[in-house]
Each structure stands twice: as C-alpha cells, then as structure tokens.
Amino acid sequence: MGINVGKVCIGLLGFFFCLVLPLSADEISELKQKVQAMGEENRLLQEKLKSQESIIQDFAGRLERLEAKEPEGLAKEKIKGIVKDALAQKEEEKKLAGLFSEGGLENMIFHGYADLEWLSDEFDKAEGGSRGHNFFDNHHFNLWFGYRMADNLLAKGEIEIEHAGDDWKLEFGDIEWKPFSNDKLELLMGKILVPLGIENPVHASVWNKLISRPLPSISIVPGTYGDVGVEARGWFPSYSKPKFRYHLYVVNGLGDNDGDYIYEQNALKRSRDNNNNKAVGAQLALFAAKGLEIGGSGYLGKWDDKDKSNTFILGPHLIYNQGPFELRSEYTFQHIENANGRAFGDADLEGMYVQAAYKLSGLKRNNFLNKWEVASRYDWINNPDGVSSLKQGSVPAGKSEDRISLGLIFRPQDWLQFKMEYMNRNNKNDEDDNALALQAVVNW
C-alpha cells in the first residue's frame, strides 16, 4: 500500500501548529475544518489524475490495436486525421459561440442619429399658397448597424426613418470586402450609397453644417441616392502623398416615374430595374496638397422603360480643409434625352453651390467660443428647358432659382449639437421669400 504524501504533509503541518501555538477550542475546530477541506481537495485531485491516466491508457491501447492491424505509418496518419477533425470541429464551435460572446459583441457595430427640426417659411406663399409653413418635424431617426467578420470583411446597412415614421427605407445595405492587405482595392456589393457628387456621403444632419441641403443635391441628383449593384474603390498610392482616390460602379440606374421625373428605383417602390440597361459611373479625386481635394463625378444610364433614352450627369468638385476652416463647392450638369415623356426633345439642367464653415476654436479665445461654428452657402439651379425632372418640382423654362443661407452651430458637449439657419430664396416667380429653421441633433 503506497503512502499518501499529501495526507502525511497535512498531518505533520497540523501537529506542528498544535505544538507551537496555544489554540482555543473554536480555533481548533476551525483548523480541523480547514484540514478536512484540504483533504477533500486532495482526494478530488487524485481522482482527476486517475481519470487522466485512464484516458491516456485507453488512447495507448487504441494506438497499439491500430499498429497491430496496419503499418506504423498508416496508423499514425489515421490518428493525425482524427485529431485534425476534432480540432476543426472545436474551432467551428468556438466561432459559433463567439457570435454571442463578449468578443463577438465587440465585432458588432451599432450607431445612429436623430434630430428635431422647427421650420418657419414663406415658400408656400411665394408659390401661390394662402400661407407659409410653421411646424415641428422629427426629420430623422436613422439606425446604422454592421458586423465585422474579419479585418477585411464587413456587412453594414442603414435604416432611414423620416418624418416621425411616415417614411421608411433601407438607405444602404452592402458587403464590404478588401481582398488585399493594402488600400488599393475595396469591393462593395449590395445596395450602395452611390458616389455621385460629394454631398451624398455627408448629407446626414450630424455632418451637414447647415439644416438645409444644397439645391442641386436634392433637385437634380436624387437626395440620398442609393442603388443596387457593385462598386470598386481605392487609393493610389497607398502610403504616400499626393494621393489619388477612385470609385467605379455598375448599378441598376435611375428610372422614370411614369414620365414625370427621373428618380431612384427604390424610392419608386420598385424591387427591380425598369429596363435591361445598367448604369455606370465614376468618381475620381486628387489630393494634390494638404487639405485640398480636386475631383469630379460622372454617371451614364438609360432611364426609360424602353431602353432608348439616356441621362448623363457630370459634376466637378473642390474641397479644402485647413484647420478650423472648410470650403466645399460643386457644379452639377444633367442631360436628359426625350425628357418629360417625349413631350419635347432633350433637356438640360444645371446647378452649383459654394459652402464655407469656420470653427470659432480657431480664434483661440475661450472654451465657450470653442463650442461654436459659423457656416454659409450660396446655391443655384437653372432649368432652361422647363423639364419636370426636378425632384421637388420644376422651375419654369428659362428660369433659375438661387438661395443664400447663413447658419450657426452650437456644440455644448460631445454627441449633441444645436443649429440655426436663415435662408433667403429668389424663387421661380422672381419673388424673394425667407425661412428660419432650428434643429437639435444627437448621434451615438
């Protein structure tokens, strides 16, 4: 019978303490309980060791039986296969469990923004109405979500909820895959936010310096143009300056609303393209100096149901960022073949805007001024042919419309901002009208 070393040590230790320390009855009872607990722990450890020895012996027996039946090399290969399959199964189980573990949640992405607006304008009066507008609007409550499966693979989307829930849509929902370790190529597949112009990627109220949006960006280019297709984008070179950025895409394309105006298919509640043509487009930009971006966008596709009439959009742009100062400018031109349901021939539309903003933190005065930013914009659209392709109604033939906007932004803390904007518009009837807008925006 073997000597249990653990029990002997525990007994000697207890005997030693009894000799050297005068203990009370309660202390002796507590010490006995601790000795019993240690003994129980030692017993469980011994049983675990015996169990492990049994597993090892069983595996050795299986190995001997395999080697007796088959050559040594083949037996070892079979064992390697068994072990490999077991490890692969464990890895799959870990991946599945990881979706709901702490690490899996870290790969999930969720954020969004919401705003409340108040608008008072004279636009309705200027267009023949009896009175202007004066109302509150919960304009946006947008939710952005995604999951990163790997460093180079991301699935993401945005649900846009507008006007207190009256208008819902999937603004974009795509798979983003970077096949190489550098920034030279990235593929987007699904419903993408089409890179047509520079305003679409920053149209959200959390990024927009004003409350309104530029006239060409809502009246010529569809306001938040999302379309189903494939986009390739990237940078050349990856790690030096100046840099060159490109976007190339193929999408279903813009369609007509029963000959009324050209618009994105999703907004017309269409799940498929209205013709067999696929639209193509590109956006190219050169970062020639610090803070300076010069580039342009182009789009070409057939818009009618019969695959006969093209629409072409072209827009050069300029962006300049230097410290607290930002300047953005863009010109948009659209040519439409057989416009207005063939009521007359081709038609052209054009528009432009210049927008500037300055953060008062650049003055380096005090912490209160650091929370403010001022912004202004001049925008203009022209409809010489009177085509009703404009999203928010046509400007009569030969007429143009321009607007001046002045804005103020206050950011009392992170994630929260308040805006005020005054607008003066020279409308389609050659009359001036004014508007005042207030907005509160929170993002997370």
Image (cartoon, grey):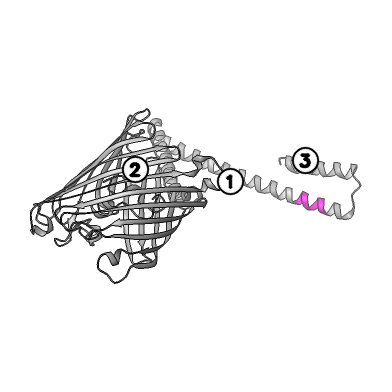
Q: Kindly indicate whether the residue at mark 3 contacts the one at mark 1 (C-beta within 8 angstroms).
A: no
Residue 192 visible in image: no
Q: Is residue 334 magenta?
A: no
Tell me the magenta residue range. Answer: 30-36
For the residues bearing labels 3 and 2, Cβ distance under 8 angstroms:
no
Q: Amino acid at mark 1?
A: Ser
What residue lies at 41% left-to-right and 52% top-to-bottom? 407
Query: Cα distance, mark 1 to mark 2?
Result: 73 Å
Circle 1 sits on which residue?
51
Q: Main secondary structure of the magenta part?
A: helix
Q: Position of residue 29 (x, y in %)?
A: 83, 54
Q: CA distance from mark 1 to mark 3?
A: 24 Å
- Amino acid type indicated by mark 2: Arg
CA gap, disc 3 and disc 2? 81 Å
Q: Secondary structure at mark 2?
A: strand
Dot 3 amino acid type: Cys
Secondary-structure class at tag 3? helix
Classed neighbour count for the residue bearing mark 2: other residues with Cα under 10 Å, few (<14), some (14–19), many (≥20): some
Q: Which residue corresponds to mark 2?
A: 328
What x and y, as percent, mark residue 349?
Answer: 18, 50
**Is any part of residue 65 visible from this angle?**
yes
Mark seen at residue 9: 3
SS at mark 1 in the image? helix
Up/down of 379 relative to 266, above or below: above
Residue 399 lies in quadrant: bottom left
Q: Residue sitting at 30 percent across and 63 percent down? A: 123
- Up-down relation of residue 133 to residue 428 (above or below): below
